[in-house]
Amino acid sequence: MYRDLRDFLAKLEQEGQLVRIKDEILPEPTIREIGRAAVDLPNGPAVIIENIKGHPGKKVALNVHGSWANIALMIGMDKDTSVKDQFFKFLELWDKYPGEVKFIDKDKAPCHEVVIKDNINLVEMLPMFRINKWDAGMFFSKASVVTRDPDDAGNFDTQNVGTYRMQVMGKDLVGIQALGFHDIARHITHAEEQNKPLPIAVCLGVDPVLTFMASTPINYDQSEYKFAAAINGIPMELTKALTCDLDVPAHAEYVLEGEILPRVRVPEGPFGEFPGSYSGTRLQSQFRVKCITHRKNPIFENLFMGRPWTEIDYLMGLNTCVPLYKQMKETMPEIVAVNAMYQHGLTAIVSTGNRFGGYAKSVAFRMASTPHGISYCKNIILVGPDVDPFNLEQVMWSLSSRVRPAKDVIVVPNTPGMPLDPTSEPAGMGAKFIIDATEPTAPDVVLRDTRLIDNPDSKGFERLIADLQKAASNK
């Protein structure tokens, strides 16, 4: 149960999952080099950089979600917990929705300890850095962005908390990528229909579960705040923004308040994105920052992403798997588990029973029609209920021994695609590639009758090996 980022960093340090760098470092290119190195270390610890040249007294946090050990600790499990067990733990916590929300007075909220409304200059006020060498500029890559639907302003649940990349374009101007299938894009459209600016609050350095939920594809009318409270096990503490009617995390390290400018589009990008490639340049919305509030001695949290795996892959791993599983399981109870950890679900593996011949292929079509799967899930692999989709050795065995290329491989052309996917051509269009590696079921037939090998009972030998290891260690 973590009230804020600082609580979680303390837990990571206690568990040996935090490294502090006290030597003075240059923002460029050192911070991104540290971000790359951290995720490649065993168990990928978080990093706090405490002495940044040009930014005395300011700190940067990296790789906070950058390993399965850190993700396990986030949900109250041992840091050595397997990914499969973490998946089922998330399913258990998911069903506790909705959690409780608690409001704190503006003048008592830690995020309002320091208020800046004049002479705003983002690059001077925050220890910004270029995440990848050829990025168009400095980006916020791990913010929880809050907006309301102007057509449903009184509905707390349709207030969106999302994660979107944002490019600093001036001292108080920021470009924001809002793709058509993002909730914020709907909010922008409704505001532009009235030719009005859209209030926005960019929250940096929030509790780890809220960050997790802000990057989760949940239903439009489900609240990220209530989900974070349910998963975290404690009420989500919010306060009102100072310049607009938005609810922001009371313990955020920074809150940038502003307005998205109506009917304004500016060139944004390129940016090194989660597939491990640069995105190119597109026309995107822009907002102006009107106010910055922050805690005393604030921590600027940002996310390094590069060629996978990096922190983004851990952050978007299980929170892609669980919503897809829940949506599909409603109508297809044969589904056992979903592994969509690979680049936000561009490749997904589904373990499912094959109720009758060809049924598994219908499971793939269902995944391809979910709100997230429509654009993201392009490579869909189906395995049987006896195969652990999180164990790639078992998945590869299933591909090797159960796939009949002429019957079990399907390509569906001209489907929606993910614009940031480098294979999307044109950007936003693609295809679905389906591999059915389940065991055929009647009335489907297999040419030859084969029988799977059963695993022998190994419990006695496991005890014997353990006794031998214990005896050897005592010598």
Image (cartoon, rainbow, N blue to C red):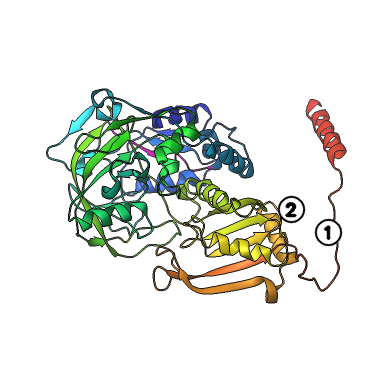
Read off the residue under disc 1.
Answer: 452
Is residue 148 rendered to the left or right of residue 448? left
- What amino acid is labelled 2 in the image? Asp
Q: How many residues crowd around disc 1 within 10 Å: few (fewer than 14), some, or many (20 or more)?
A: few
In the rendered structure, find residue 436 and report the number of the disc placed on it: none
**Can residue 47 be seen here?**
no
Front-most of residues 63 and 336: 336
Front-most of residues 16 and 227: 227
Percent x, y of residue 354: 71, 60
Q: Report how many numbered discs are placed on residues in the image.
A: 2
In the rendered structure, find residue 386 and report the number of the disc placed on it: 2
Front-most of residues 229 and 268: 229
**What are the residue bounds of the magenta stretch?**
58-67
| Marks 2,1: beta carbons within 8 A | yes
Percent x, y of residue 236: 40, 31
Q: How many residues crowd around disc 2 within 10 Å: few (fewer than 14), some, or many (20 or more)?
A: some
Gap in angstroms between the C-alphas marked 2 and 1: 11 Å
Residue 219 vs 59, above or below: the answer is: below
Please name the residue shown 52% across and 31% down the image. Answer: 16
